[in-house]
Amino acid sequence: MKVLGIESSCDETGVAVYDTGLPGAAGLRAHAVYSQIALHAEYGGVVPELASRDHVRKLLPLVRQTLAEAGLGVGEIDGVAYTAGPGLVGALLVGAGVARSLAWALDVPAVAVHHMEGHLLAPLMEDDPPQPPFVALLVSGGHTQLVAVDGIGRYRLLGETLDDAAGEAFDKTAKLMGLPYPGGPQLAALAEQGRPGAYRFSRPMTDRPGLDFSFSGLKTQVLLAWQQSDRSDQTRADIARGFEDAVVETLAIKCQRALDAAGSDVIVVSGGVGANRRLRARLQEMAAARGGRACFPRPALCTDNGAMIAFAGALRLAAGQHDGPAVHVTPRWDMATLAPVATAA
Ligand code: ATP
Ligand code: MG
Ligand code: FE
């Protein structure tokens, strides 16, 4: 079945076609993302109303472009999947409205997808996907969660951040050292030139049991170090490296604990921070040392995209799930309340 996926929860418009009839990564027939980063940059963060309006402008051209790239006519689509939450209500409504209207016009089913389930399942789009049970680490701009995945749609929260998300910590730390918005990826690039060990920051909440995180204190440590330094380019890179090492090491320690708690050796990682090269290497090393593996989506599918929504929706549609015709979104939505997806045993 060929499923059109639409993502519009925040500041990325994403559209994709996923074909369940093709194996592994080949199932992704086409995907396109339009990022609004430039639009929001002068405000230093996402302005919700501007985001909604830009989704209105970009969504239909992206749908046309994606269908053309997939070599499909709109009438060949068998189902539509769209992000219904969590996210900005206005932005979500744009995607939901377009998706519902298309499904109505084409007389095909449409399914509401949870954005974080999209992130969580994205690694399963790649070749040789892991099968549940496994542990998922979600590290994005708004979330840092460890989730026990007992099956598709069967999620148990093991731990989460008590304050800043990992991506948010990257962005805020970048900002206080003068990097332009959103600074996460730039901070990571800068860390490549930094000397390991030149600055050492704490690994928050690793000195006590538990699987929760706290990243807000790290940025205060960085701020103090930056203010007391010579503020040279090399120092900035050294601090970036110290910060990145602290986040990566903290995540690795908690992932290891979560695998122990869940009795698993497979960690599945996604969300924007999953694109971080050092995190990928460190978690792969950690999983390999225990005879398991760490699975990631390709970097472009770590940040927001339509492919993950098409894929997660396709799994539900293929299992016969879909929602009624109302345009309904859920800006706050607990992943533990999702319906399980029955898969062939
Ligand atoms: P959520 O999914 O929780 O609603 P979001 O959709 O805004 O949040 P994503 O698009 O998944 O988040 O990820 C964006 C975040 O990932 C940003 O905070 C960004 O700084 C961070 N990020 C992207 N690339 C990297 C990288 N290479 N290293 C560290 N952080 C990164
Ligand atoms: Mg974004
Ligand atoms: Fe996201």
Image: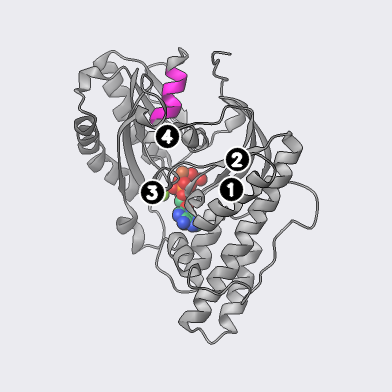
Which quadrant would residue 166 be assigned to in this image? bottom right
Mark 4 is on which residue type? Met
The residue under label 3 is 48
The earlier-in-sequence mark between 2 and 3 is 3
Q: Is residue 213 left or right of residue 227?
A: right
Residue 148 position, x and y percent, is 66, 33
Q: Is residue 208 left or right of residue 314?
A: right
Which type of secondary structure does the marked residue at label 3 adopt? helix
Q: Residues within 10 Å of mark 4 (few under 14, many from 20)?
A: many
Mark-to-mark CA distance, 3 and 4 = 22 Å
The residue under label 2 is 293
Residue 46 position, x and y percent, is 40, 54
Mark 1 is on which residue type? Gln
The N terminus lies in quadrant:
top left
The residue under label 1 is 284
Mark 2 is on which residue type? Arg
Callout in the foreground (2, 3): 2
Q: Residue at x 44, y 65 (%)?
A: 189
Residue 167 position, x and y percent, is 52, 55
The residue under label 4 is 308
Mark-to-mark CA distance, 1 and 2 = 6 Å
Mark 1 vs 2: CB contact within 8 A: yes
- The vertical placement of 286 against 190, above or below, is above
Ligand 2 within 8 angstroms of badge 3 C-beta: no
Which type of secondary structure does the marked residue at label 2 adopt? strand
Q: Residues within 10 Å of mark 2 (few under 14, many from 20)?
A: some
Callout in the foreground (1, 4): 1
